[in-house]
Image (cartoon, rainbow, N blue to C red):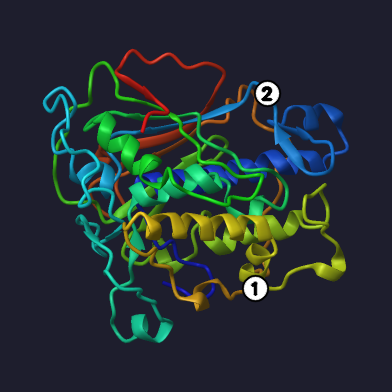
Amino acid sequence: MNDRGFAVNDCHAEIIARRCFLRFIYDQLEMHLSEDPEVRGQSVFELRDGGGYKLKPSIHFHLYISTAPCGDARIFSPHGQDVETGDRHPNRKARGQLRTKIESGEGTIPVRSSGFIQTWDGVLEGERLLTMSCSDKIARWNVLGIQGALLCHFMHPIYLESIILGSLYHSDHLSRAVYCRIAGIENLPDLFQLNRPFLSGISSPESRQPGKAPNFGINWRRNDDTFEVINAMTGRVEGGNMSRICKQALFDRFMNLYGRLSSLTGQSVTTRPTLYSEAKAAVMEYQLAKQCVFQAFQKAGLGNWVQKPIEQDQFEMSQDVPDIQLKPAEGDTATTEVKKGISIFPTLEQISSLSLSLSLSLSLNFPGEKVVGQC
């Protein structure tokens, strides 16, 4: 953990892939800084009436995960749907509980029954840093969108069109974990909704090789010259440098666009935020929607969302702003892929098949078992 935004706190594949997706979104927005209409036209975004940007109608995002996300979706799915054809008690109280990851990456545990506040000095003195499970984070994305607070300065929420699992797919457990358990959410701001993505397994599930979680994460997205290896124990790349997907790097991308693009928040030089936390707080509807998510879990008796210490977000923009790439590579299909492997600083041959990807697609046709919007 780091108070300047240099460390990546969570190196699970779903989280790394989503952070790569944020880099892709910044790439697409930066195209609109170009004076060349041809470059602007290649972006997946177009200007919307009233300010800001919207996805072009043909653009959809799909999430593929090689196995069920940790937490509620996985813990009750030790076998795929082909083995356990039905769950007689998919919504019993023990199921659906918020869970936090164990720091070493080995499993999850239920959140404490009473409200718990993580403090910066407590973590520095040796308390374990608690991070919510991937199942919980995906459920949150299905209300707040996958773009996060900063990008809501420029656009409405972006929701996943589908979630596809390569193994350990169970329709009851996955649907409960990613949206059904907060079906009673109330008082959402107008821009937000409870998204119910298409859910499916695949016709030929991937073979699983259970083992200890790797102590590194690898990230790459189209147009990157190389992949980047993050030490999952430190949240940094080799040599202690900050990752290109850490909070500081993404905040720099945001600040480089602030006041230069059409926005939904009336950006101006006089209102330019200084801190990362200030930039997030300025999107009031997003913050209200986030509180609605927390309240929905509480009212359902599923526990209290554990938030990181507030000091973690109180940092300023760094001095090194990344270069802007205004023209995509030829044949770019805007695909983001992440793979996780076996040992720190691997060779390509050592990278295992455990992978996750976020991709753009115009159509979807999966032959596996499907669930659409059922609770």
In the picture of the structure, the residue carrying the numbered disc 2 is: 57
In the picture of the structure, the residue carrying the numbered disc 1 is: 316
Q: Where is residue 375 in the image (x, y as percent from the top left)?
A: 36, 33
- Give the left or right position of residue 22, taking residue 255 as reference: left
Q: Which sits in the foreground, 254 or 184?
A: 184
Total marks placed? 2
To which quarter of the image does residue 237 belong? bottom left
Q: Residue at x 67, y 65 (%)?
A: 279
Q: Earlier in the sequence, mark 1 or mark 2?
A: 2
Secondary structure state at the residue bearing disc 1 = loop
Q: Against 270, is 210 above or below? A: above
To which quarter of the image does residue 69 belong? top left
Q: Which residue is drawn at 58% across and 50% down?
A: 188
Q: Residue at x 32, y 40 (%)?
A: 176
Q: Against 154, is 332 above or below? A: above
Q: Where is residue 146 in the image (x, y as percent from the top left)?
A: 53, 44
- Disc 2 marks a residue whose amino acid type is Pro
- Give the left or right position of residue 278, taking residue 128 as reference: right
Q: Against 197, is 11 above or below? A: below
The CA distance from mark 1 to mark 2 is: 36 Å
Q: Where is residue 164 in the image (x, y as percent from the top left)?
A: 36, 28
Name the quadrant of the N terminus: bottom left
To which quarter of the image does residue 107 belong? bottom left
Residue 339 appears in view: no
